[in-house]
């Protein structure tokens, strides 16, 4: 019997490039404590996180089908 996915958990962060290591740490902590029966959307609001750091942070969820990491650049909104 297939298990039903529960409601999605959405967590929003705000950071800049200088705080990228801390953002990665807190996202990894969240990911380490996820429930496989829930979906998670981790959203980082930013104005200056480098492409390199976004790629590295995005890799945290690469092998997890229930975790999505998105970046929203507020300087373009």
Image (tube, helix red, strand yellow):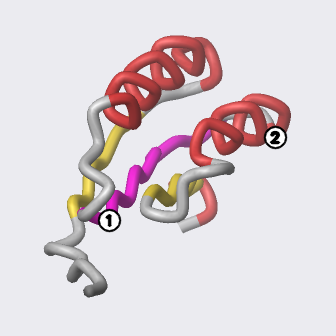
Residue on which disc 2 sits? 51
- Between 26 and 50, the one nearer to me in the picture: 26
Please indicate whether residue 22 sits to the left or right of residue 41 in the image. right
Q: In whole angstroms, how far apart are the C-alphas of marks 2 and 1?
A: 25 Å
Please indicate whether residue 52 sits to the left or right of residue 29 in the image. right
Quadrant location of the N terminus? bottom left
- Vertically, is 34 above or below 43? above
- Vertically, is 57 above or below 11? above
Q: Which residue sits furthest right?
A: 52
- Between 58 and 1, the one nearer to me in the picture: 1
* Mark toward the start of the polypeptide (2 vs 1): 1
Where in the figure is residue 71, as x and y percent of width and height? 56, 53
Q: Residue at x 21, y 82 (%)?
A: 4
Q: Dot 1: within a 10 Å radius of its alpha carbon, few (fewer than 14), some, or many (20 or more) residues?
A: some
Residue on which disc 1 sits? 39
**Prevailing secondary structure class for the magenta stretch in the rendered image:** strand
Mark 2: secondary structure: helix
Where in the figure is residue 43, as x and y percent of width and height? 42, 52
Please indicate whether residue 71 sits to the left or right of residue 35 in the image. right
Q: Residue at x 42, y 31 (%)?
A: 27
Question: Disc count in the image?
Answer: 2
Q: Is residue 40 inside the magenta stretch?
A: yes
Where in the figure is residue 40, as x and y percent of width and height? 33, 58
Q: Which residues are magenta?
A: 38-48
The answer to whether mark 2 and mark 1 are in CB contact below 8 A is no
- Between 45 and 23, the one nearer to me in the picture: 23
Mark 1: secondary structure: loop
The image quadrant of residue 10 is bottom left
Q: Dot 2: within a 10 Å radius of its alpha carbon, few (fewer than 14), some, or many (20 or more) residues?
A: few
Where in the figure is residue 70, as x and y percent of width and height? 54, 57
The image quadrant of residue 73 is bottom right
Q: Residue at x 62, y 62 (%)?
A: 76
């Amino acid at each position: 019997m297939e298990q039903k996915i529960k409601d999605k958990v959405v967590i929003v962060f705000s950071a800049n490039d200088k705080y990228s290591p801390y953002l990665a740490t807190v996202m990894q902590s969240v990911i380490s404590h996820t429930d496989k029966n829930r979906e998670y959307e981790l959203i980082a609001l930013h104005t200056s996180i480098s492409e390199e750091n976004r790629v590295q942070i995005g890799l945290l969820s690469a092998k997890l089908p229930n975790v999505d990491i998105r970046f929203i650049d507020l300087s373009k909104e």
